[in-house]
């Protein structure tokens, strides 16, 4: 009974067709001036600026009201009303205002060389996860990195390209969809894995992905942990009985916390066993800042913590949040823009919480250059 709503949603997502429109231009970059030459980004919708616009999937966000608070109100494919944390980061680092999606084939060499995102909304470490919606699997994102590298090599040569990769900061967000869409909603994996077995399974695959980045020359990798999955409006809707009040599902939050602990304990040995002793793997805590917003909304000026701004806020995401869906009058009062994704304002605050880590990475970079 309790998962019938999420099953229904998943089925409607899977069988729905269409609703695709063209995203608008991403504003031009600033002149390059920094110690970090580029950000190279991988993973899921938290950091996907619109790669799914170029993929045969129904999981898209390139139509209003997505992007209603973005420059020119452009619905670029970002799953929020404004900018992603990585847009705030690349702008803070002084590289450019927005991270473009790699799959836009019109990007110039300069745009490529200052950083792109390979991320694809709906993906995860478990190979079954990207198959649910036919999005870009993580190993395919690694192939795109190889192709990216060849394009840069053709322009600036192999030595310079190796140097660029070495100095770039890599950032990855993955795992949300493995747990939320796959394990707890589609539930096929529950036949074969207990939740703690599944955590280890996902982590093993994620580690292989990080190793793939390292073997392509990455030396600075920031890994974003899981947010409080039990507090996503979608989780609350599908895992609690209506009318009992919308509260975070503690059992699912504890899965996210367990996974984050395991993840951090994987990263340390991974870093120390690299032949290049300058290799750094950083952990970015996403759980803490979002949980603090949810527990202390008034501290940040939020008024709604358990429903998204788009539609009823209970289930809508992707094409269920579309030009016909009503939206809340002021998205900046909402932690969540849709039933899964934070609002622009929450993402800005997440970026603020990441700032000490970003400053630390910049300092590290200056020290090793
Ligand atoms: C793709 O990138 C080019 C070059 O930056 C830009 O002019 C174009 O608007 C982008 N396409 C989309 C759909 O954003
Ligand atoms: C970077 O830009 C700032 C101002 O925007 C300038 O003061 C600084 O000298 C520049 N640094 C380099 C290395 O060009
Ligand atoms: C579960 O395990 C069985 C037997 O090993 C296998 O046939 C099946 O494909 C697995 N299902 C999933 C979803 O992994």
Image (tube, rainbow, N blue to C red):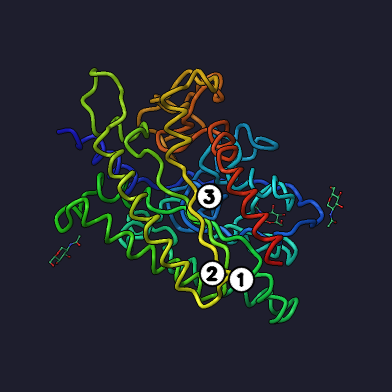
Please state the horizontal and vertical placement of residue 348, each as a whole percent of the image: 59, 36
Residue 123: percent from the left, percent from the top?
41, 55
Is tag 2's residue or tag 3's residue first in the polypeptide sequence?
3
Q: Is residue 340 above or below residue 52?
A: above
Q: Do the residues labelled 1 and 2 touch (CB within 8 Å)?
A: yes
Mark 3 element type: loop
Q: For residue 353, which numbered disc appears in the image? A: none
The residue that mark 2 highlights is 144
Are the two marked residues, 1 and 3, in contact with CB atoms closer than 8 angstroms? no
Name the residue beneath numbered marker 1: 148
Q: Quadrant of the N terminus?
A: top left
Q: Which residue: 79% across, 51% down?
A: 30
Q: Which residue is drawn at 35% across and 39% down?
A: 229
- The span from disc 1 to disc 2 (Cα, nearest Å) is 6 Å
Note whether residue 25 is visible: no
In which image quadrant can residue 344 be found? top right
Q: Residue at x 35, y 32 (%)?
A: 231
Residue 53 visible to an observer of this rendering? yes
Residue occupying image coordinates x 33% and y 56%: 129
Where residue 12 appears, x then y in whole percent? 31, 42
Q: Which of marks 1 and 3 is nearer the N terminus?
A: 3
Residue position for label 3? 47
């Amino acid at each position: 009974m309790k998962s019938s709503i999420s099953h229904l949603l998943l089925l409607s997502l899977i069988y729905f067709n269409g609703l695709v429109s063209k995203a608008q231009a991403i504003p031009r970059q600033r002149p390059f001036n920094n110690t970090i030459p580029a950000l190279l980004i991988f993973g899921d919708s938290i950091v996907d600026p619109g790669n799914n616009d170029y993929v045969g999937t129904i999981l898209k966000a390139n139509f209003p009201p997505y992007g209603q608070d973005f420059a020119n109100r452009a619905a670029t494919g970002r799953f929020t009303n404004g900018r992603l944390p990585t847009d705030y980061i690349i702008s803070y680092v002084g590289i450019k205002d927005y991270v473009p999606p790699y799959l836009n084939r019109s990007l110039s060499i300069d745009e490529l060389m200052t950083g792109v995102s390979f991320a694809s909304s709906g993906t995860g470490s478990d190979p079954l996860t990207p198959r649910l919606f036919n999005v870009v699997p993580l190993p395919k994102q690694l192939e795109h990195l190889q192709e990216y590298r060849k394009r840069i090599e053709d322009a600036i040569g192999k030595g310079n390209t190796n140097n660029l990769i070495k100095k770039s900061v890599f950032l990855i967000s993955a795992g949300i969809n493995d747990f939320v869409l796959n394990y707890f909603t589609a539930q096929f994996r529950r036949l074969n894995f207990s939740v703690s077995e599944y955590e280890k399974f996902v982590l093993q695959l994620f580690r292989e992905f990080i190793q793939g980045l390292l073997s392509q020359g990455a030396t600075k990798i920031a890994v974003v942990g899981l947010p409080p999955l039990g507090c996503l409006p979608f989780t609350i809707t599908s895992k609690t009985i209506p009318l009992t009040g919308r509260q975070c599902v503690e059992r699912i939050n504890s899965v996210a916390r367990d996974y984050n602990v395991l993840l951090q304990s994987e990263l340390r040995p991974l870093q120390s066993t690299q032949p290049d002793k300058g290799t750094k793997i950083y952990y970015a805590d996403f759980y803490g800042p979002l949980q603090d917003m949810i527990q202390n909304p008034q501290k940040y000026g939020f008024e709604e913590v358990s429903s998204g701004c788009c539609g009823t806020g209970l289930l809508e995401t992707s094409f269920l949040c579309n030009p016909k869906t009503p939206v809340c009058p002021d998205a900046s009062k909402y932690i969540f823009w849709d039933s899964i994704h934070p609002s622009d304002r929450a993402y800005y605050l997440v970026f603020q919480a990441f700032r000490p880590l970003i400053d630390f990475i910049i300092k590290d970079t200056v020290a090793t250059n």
